[in-house]
Amino acid sequence: MGGGNQEALKQLQSLMENVDEQLKNTFQNMHQGYPAETLIRFLKARDWNVSKAHKMLSDCLNWRVENEIDKVLTKPIPADLYRAIRDSQLIGMSGYSKEGLPVIGVGVGLSTYDKASDKYYIQSHIQINEYRDRVILPTASRKHERYLGTCVKVLDMTGLKFSALNQLRLLTAISTIDDLNYPEKTDTYYIVNAPYVFSACWKVVKPLLQERTRRKIQVLQGSGKEELLKVMDYASLPHFCRKEDSKSSKHNASGNIENCFSFNHVFHQQLYNHIKHQAIIRESISPPIRQGSFYVDIPEPDPDDAKIAKTIETEFHKLENQKNGFTNSRNGVTVNGHRNTSY
């Protein structure tokens, strides 16, 4: 870290000394013994501008307090509903990279978000974030005897369709929560199984991304298996990367324990059991809280992020119209003297 960056860190540390006790407590939950590294994340997210990083961090701490984020791991979602969420919000941890970073698989293309209300998908997403930051990463840091504060994400685009537009509002809300409250938590994004619709959108969206973000994104060929094996062992590969001919990231069988999205996978079993255990501890010292009683304010998205979301929406509409136009032209073609009007 250069001299200018070191000075920026000192300034932000000084500003943090003046926050009230409530904000200091939630900051402790955030940094898990690594306060300087956490401040650096916010400085990086705001290009080392101290005043902007301070505002971002202050907004984040207030958001955590106002929405009781510190208690989210004591609020289990009912088991049947949680299982339904796992079948429709495809995300899970498949293992660790060779550097010790958690490997998170995300089924972007086949997630439907249609089995529960938005609040439960947001609650589940925040719980995964908090479990990663308060349990997974501190444990990994102790094991490797060095600070580990990021993860690797493998995004499976299998099944990505124009209907993804129906989920854009919810996905934008989740992305906004991550960008403003969990910045710089992903080391690399690997895109795999990318269909044409992704490739077309990527050409338009890529120039809008900050250089820092663009450097993190790698679009791999096919399932990305060969490239990913350079950064993780086979056992840590997400299930959708293990076979070149794999057609579905959603179900090898929904109960398959190798499917990192499945409720039965070891990661989700450990996460859910941890939340249930924390709920029992909390109930022993305070009145019980109703399962699933969790609401969170969605921060206003950064203008640049809002622009990207709008660009994706516009590009999807454009591609959909092109597809419909091509389909209609085929339906109107003359074959062997007969006009084809079938649909």
Image: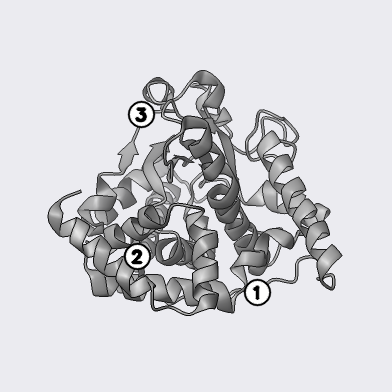
Q: How far apart are marks 2 and 3 (CA)?
A: 26 Å
For residue 295, the mark is: 1
**Between discs 1 and 2, the one toward the N terminus:** 1
For residue 221, the mark is: 3
Circle 3 — which element? loop
Q: Name the residue: 50% across, 74% down.
A: 23
**Between discs 1 and 3, the one toward the N terminus:** 3
Residue 169 percent location from the top left of the image:
50, 68
Q: Which amino acid does label 1 sit on?
A: Tyr
Q: Name the residue: 20% across, 48% down.
A: 1
Q: Which amino acid does label 2 sit on?
A: Thr
The answer to whether residue 304 is seen in the rendering is: no
Q: What residue type is labelled 3?
A: Gln
Q: Distance between the residues labelled 1 and 3?
A: 39 Å
Q: Distance between the residues labelled 1 and 2?
A: 30 Å
> Marks 3 and 1: in contact by CB < 8 Å?
no
Horizontally, residue 143 falls left or right of residue 283, namely left
Farthest residue toward the left? 3
For residue 314, the mark is: 2
Label 1 or label 2, whichever lies nearer to me, is 1
